[in-house]
Amino acid sequence: MSHSAVIVGPQGLDVTDWEKAHFRETDPWGFILFARNVGDPDQLRRLTAGLREAVGRNAPIMIDQEGGRVQRMRAPHWREYLPALDQMTRASDPIRAMWLRNRLIAQELHDVGLDANCAPLADLLEDAAHPVMRNRLYGRDVDTVVQAARTAAEAHLDGGVLPILKHIPGYGRATVDSHKELPTVRVSRKELELRDFAPFRALSDMAMGMTAHIVFTDIDPDHPATISATMMQVIRRDIGFDGLIMTDDIGMDALSGTPAERATASLKAGCDLVLHCNGDRAEVEAVANASGQMSAAALARAERALAQRKPPVPIDIPGAIAELEALLA
């Protein structure tokens, strides 16, 4: 069975009549939620159930719930978390704390019908890293970042939630915010392969990943990675990532052209799925029309990813909270 090669964000707290009809007709592979979609736990359960009812299957529904600044589900209904870098710095056992944090996040997501999360991050912290990224990262050295990201991914899977590795092939050197403009990285390919790409190579067995809207001038000076066939070959062949690859949000100003043109360019370059987030009706329709159906290779990768979607392993939630607090004391 094929699906539209899109992951789409609904407009609000409930599935509208138009969305029900559109999603039934176009059958997007999955959905992504944002703060505009989040009220309270019961509302989120209704929304996630409604989205799956619209497409008639157990479609994956994801969110950006890193903890810290990028956290769509917040107090008073959900726990607040430190920025990841602050937690890594403060914790007496950073890796254990990373597992606990992400296992708790996964439990909160699974409880309201969310089964994928746009985390972990394997981007490396650099001196010039833009503030939009800085305290979301896990550290400066490859080994630490790989260990923390691997631990976060395993904690998500233990909680019944699919982790999505980002931002392939590395956002740490970006000095501007890709939501607003296109970052350009000018270091040599050799340096990129030794440092920036190394964490993603070590994590290349993960089942799902998200691209970075960044130009790497020594590899493709004309196109950001998301719409660069050359960079996608690097990701697939040199980094070795054979998981399901979605774009970062194609609504970001780092990309040029209409949303439909961006979707077409992303899929042509080699992405498996287009991520469209803002819920605007005209854009949603245009992107769905431009994206068409998932390729056979994308469907195979999607099937492998969804095979990892398992019931949560039982955990003592109060005990996990207490242990995390003690590690951060």
Image (tube, rainbow, N blue to C red):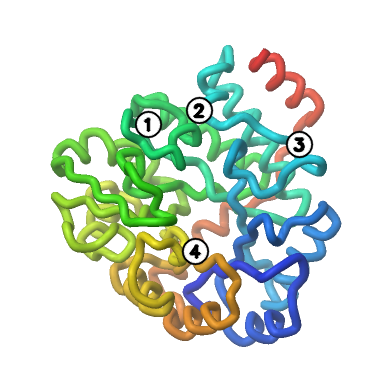
Q: Which residue is mark 2?
A: 85
State if disc 2 and disc 1 touch (CB < 8 Å). yes
Quarter of the image with the C terminus is top right
Which amino acid type is marked by label 3?
Pro
The label shown at residue 47 is: none
| Residue 38: quarter of image | bottom right
| For marks 2 and 4 on the same chain, the one whose residue lies earlier in the sequence | 2
Residue sitting at x 50%, y 36%: 136
**Mark in front: 4 vs 1:** 1
Quarter of the image with the N terminus is bottom right
- The crowding category of the residue bearing disc 4, from other C-alpha atoms within 10 Å (few below 14, some 14 to 19, many at least 20), is many
**Residue 251: horizontal and vertical position, in percent?**
46, 66
Q: Which residue is mark 4?
A: 302
**Mark in front: 1 vs 3:** 1
| For marks 4 and 3 on the same chain, the one whose residue lies earlier in the sequence | 4
| For marks 4 and 1 on the same chain, the one whose residue lies earlier in the sequence | 1
